[in-house]
Amino acid sequence: MHPFPETDLSPWRDNWLEQSWRRSEQAGLAQQQAPEHVRLDQQQLSERQFHAQGLIRVVEQWALPLFNQMLAGSNSRLLLTDQEGVIIGAWGQSRFEQRLTSIALESGVCWQESLKGTNAIGTALADQRVVSVIGDQHFIRQHRFISCSAGPVFGPTGALLGVLDITSEQQVHSEQVRMLIQTMVQQVENALLCQIPNGKFRVDIACDSALFDSGWQGIVIADAGGRILAKNAVATRLLAQAKCAGEQLEALLARPQTGASAMMLPAGELVLNCQPLETSGHEPTPRSRVYSPSCPLHYGDDQIEQAWQQACKLINKDISLLILGETGVGKGEFVKQLHRHSQRHAGPLVAVNCGALPQELIESELFGYAPGAFTGASKQGYHGKVRQADGGILFLDEIADMPLAAQCRLLHVLQEKEVVPIGSNQAQQVDIQIIAATHKNLEQLVAEGLFRQDLYYRLNGLILTLPALRERQDRADLIAAIHRQHRHQAQEICPHLMQLLSTYAWPGNIRELDNVLRVATLLSDHAAQLTLAHLPQHIATPLVQQSQPRTAQASGTGKDLRTTLSDTLLETYRANKGNISKTARMLGISRNTLYRKLRKLGVRST
Ligand SMILES: Nc1ncnc2c1ncn2[C@@H]1O[C@H](COP(=O)(O)OP(=O)(O)OP(=O)(O)O)[C@@H](O)[C@H]1O
């Protein structure tokens, strides 16, 4: 018999479950009716994944191995949502993935309780604690073939970052899964804690030193001066329980060790262990350097980090910013992040692409117009983008394409903080921060009389230049991160393809890379490794051809050019499974030349 009759609530003894079912009913859901899906499109999902890339990385490093160890062979999936319950990461059995697709338990779909009824993700979000929802406990009947355990993940400042969930077939799920989720959440939160900016020392606190590597110890992070920056919940509890531990902690941090060695102190029934953060062994160890969560735009590129630091210092100071950089380097993305971090984050971010608007419409689009200002104008008039951005940020992309007349009006807005709509003589006050961007050389345009010099000086309060993708120090990490956004399961990029992608010139920068990886992962049909053979021909050929001399220079492994080229030839041949025509096309050589080279390398081609 069904333990939770569809209309009778009386048999319920479990308070949290009863409350969750009540909330589901109050949200207008019906047990027998499949709920509607709130699903993001691919672009929106990529944006969310991009903003949560630090969290995704930590989950892959600290939670995924545990999941693989315990549940990889079973019909289970590890899911990560953002703080709104939208699934932004999914790992595990692909055969089970297809069954979950029938209920839309997949990337991009929102699983808040008010949309999906009682379920581990939504209910963990609502109750802000670890929750297991087993089979029939799901509010929606269609969901009762699964069981899930989920726990909220909090960042070092206590902000809710998302939810980690394990969903299994009902008979696979056990109480241990709930423990597993708890352990994973703990590990992920500890790893995030260790990445806190300016963290220099880490003090582990436990009742037994054997617990120091367990993930269940208390952790306190302090800066170079011994000031406590953050601590995890276990540390808070232990320090509250043992008063002398707090004093010992203070004493320890008053003279923290700067060397590699740890310093251990007994504190009543507790033991404290202080060590420099860099050598703790608990930090994620990305290939380049520790990712700074203060700037979600890069994985260790000095130029972007410097631009970000400078922009953050000025963004709240009413100084215009001008962002330069080739097309597709991420200027728009930079502005989005800046808006989020600025004091104007509650206000709008209004972006205008001056190059995309017809020249004759730019002025009315930007500055608005009075009712009936010109033939064809709306009777109500139009507010214009400048006034829409009031209280927020106006991002003028491709500013170099702005016609001179509009430049004159814009200068007035910048100087007087007011806008006069077309056909009106009434100035409207506005409070906006302007950020402009271009990939053109504005100084040259000024010299040619195509851009107003006074406006140029007004816009360039701070000029920031974002590097081209080929110049970035964190290319490999960025490529891996973008690939993670597009892949459907734990797929890796094979080393040869990674080398080609990292050394290619990328004229279209991140936009081009993003498109290539999106298409390649779709073409790869869930293969365990993404290889050259999965790339469309039109990109694989230039990739192989252009990268050859660079590959040799950049490899720095002591191999000479000839050896590296031979490697590329052989790997391309293998990636194409011995297909001579395809390999020759990719390498840009004739079939005969390819046969000859293969023979020289001792390969017997068919
Ligand atoms: N750091 C990043 N990680 C992942 N994707 C990124 C990153 N930066 C930018 N992108 C993606 O690259 C694409 C181009 O970014 P964006 O539009 O910000 O570039 P842009 O420099 O403003 O281009 P344009 O000059 O042509 O306007 C977008 O799809 C964006 O989501």
Image: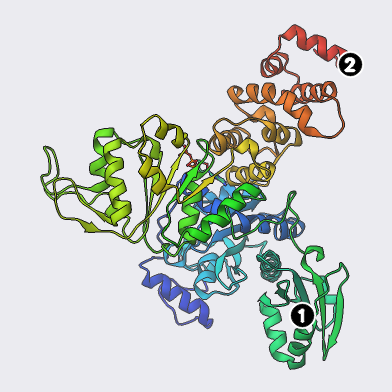
View extreme (top): residue: 592
Q: Position of residue 74 (x, y in %)?
A: 70, 55
* Amino acid type of the residue tagged 1 in the rendering: Leu
The front one of 451 and 105 is: 451
Q: Is residue 1 visible?
A: no
Q: Is mark 2 within 8 Å of ligand 1?
A: no
Mark 1 vs 2: CB contact within 8 A: no
Q: Where is residue 304 in the image (x, y as percent from the top left)?
A: 60, 49
Q: Where is residue 39 in the image (x, y as percent from the top left)?
A: 44, 52
Question: Disc 1 versus disc 2: distance between alpha carbons?
Answer: 64 Å
Mark 2 surroundings: few (<14), some (14-19) or many (≥20) residues within 10 A: few
* SS at mark 2 in the image: loop
Q: Quadrant of the C terminus?
A: top right
Vertical order, 395 against 405 (above or below): below
Residue at position x 73%, y 36% in the image: 494
Residue at position x 67%, y 56% in the image: 291
Report the residue marked by disc 1: 253
Vertical order, 63 against 108 (above or below): below
Residue at position x 85%, y 23% in the image: 563
Q: Where is residue 402 in the image (x, y as percent from the top left)?
A: 34, 37
Report the residue marked by disc 2: 602
Mark 1 vs mark 2: in front: 1
Left or right: 563, with 289 as reference point: right
